[in-house]
Amino acid sequence: MDPLREYGFTALPRDPNILLNGKDNIKAPGPVLVKDVPLPDSTLAKTVMGHARAELAEETFNHSMRVFFYGQAIVREQFPDWAFSDETYLLTCLLHDIGTTAKNLRATRMSFEFYGGLIALDLLHQQHDAPKEQAESVAEAIIRHQDIGETGKITTVGQLIQLATIFDNMGGHAALIHHDTIVDVVKHFPRKKWSSCFSATIREENDLKPWAHTTALGEDDFPNGVQNNKLMEPFD
């Protein structure tokens, strides 16, 4: 086993426009439904799924699951050669917003993505004996999932969760995923006014920590963009 491929460490351009050759998509996407994407069912995946259900608000848990299925749709339709284990990506999705809980936002001065990465590293490797490389891949992707930019590189798992979270949170890269995929994923994991919920969380962190990394996306532009997500408005 090559841990770099298994755990999604292969370096990709951080700029999605490079990946897409300046186009909206590589090809017109087809529907990828929840039933078409088996969830990893390892002991580790089931344990972390239970942890996420217990720790996250329902709105955040549903978002995390949508990010998993949207990411799978993006890879299957646009980037089938990308290498990573589905388990590693699921773990990343389940834990990427663990730092946004009311308890965790107030447990540290660190930005939520950075603290969330540390939580994930400890939970996976120290508490549940996940391979060190896998835990580190998940932690790195969580820390960098809002590290949007046009320069440099990022891991495969990191790029995928960026694409999927931007899609669910802001309707970004809308041409990567078929409308029927959205309908089906939201049916299984309802948004429950996620746009308002997450924009409020962004503002809450910015109030608590004016230095937060989230401010790099625009102190007003980012929460406003989330709140005014036109692609997902019919589903909220």
Image (spheres, rainbow, N blue to C red):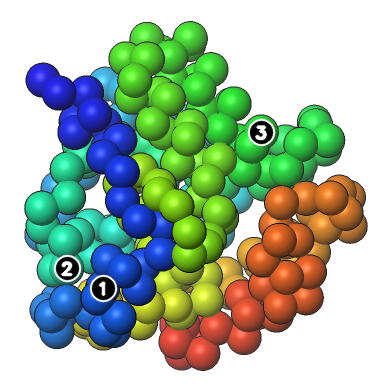
Pointer 1: residues within 10 angstroms few (<14), some, or many (20+)?
some
Q: Is residue 19 above or below residue 96?
A: below
Pointer 3: residues within 10 angstroms few (<14), some, or many (20+)?
many
In the rendered image, residue 159, in percent from the top left (x then y), is placed at 37, 54
Picture quadrant of residue 182 = bottom left
Residue 176 shows in the view: yes
The reply to whether the C-beta atoms of the residues labelled 2 and 3 are less than 8 Å apart is no
Identity, as a three-letter code, of the amino acid under mark 3: Tyr
Q: Earlier in the sequence, mark 2 or mark 3?
A: 2
Helix, strand or loop status at disc 3:
helix
Residue drawn at the location 31% of the way across and 69% of the way down: 18
Residue drawn at the location 30% of the way across and 81% of the way down: 22
Which one is closest to the eye, mark 1 or mark 3? 1
The reply to whether the C-beta atoms of the residues labelled 1 and 3 are less than 8 Å apart is no
Which one is closest to the eye, mark 2 or mark 3? 2
| In this picture, residue 233 sits left or right of residue 114 | left
Picture quadrant of residue 220 = bottom right
**Residue closer to the observer: 29 or 236:** 29
Pointer 2: residues within 10 angstroms few (<14), some, or many (20+)?
some
Residue 98 shows in the view: no
* Mark identifier at residue 115: 3
Q: Earlier in the sequence, mark 2 or mark 1?
A: 1
For the residues labelled 2 and 1, the Cα–Cα distance comes to 9 Å
Pointer 1 residue: 20
**Residue closer to the observer: 190 or 25:** 25
For the residues labelled 1 and 3, the Cα–Cα distance comes to 31 Å
Identity, as a three-letter code, of the amino acid under mark 1: Leu
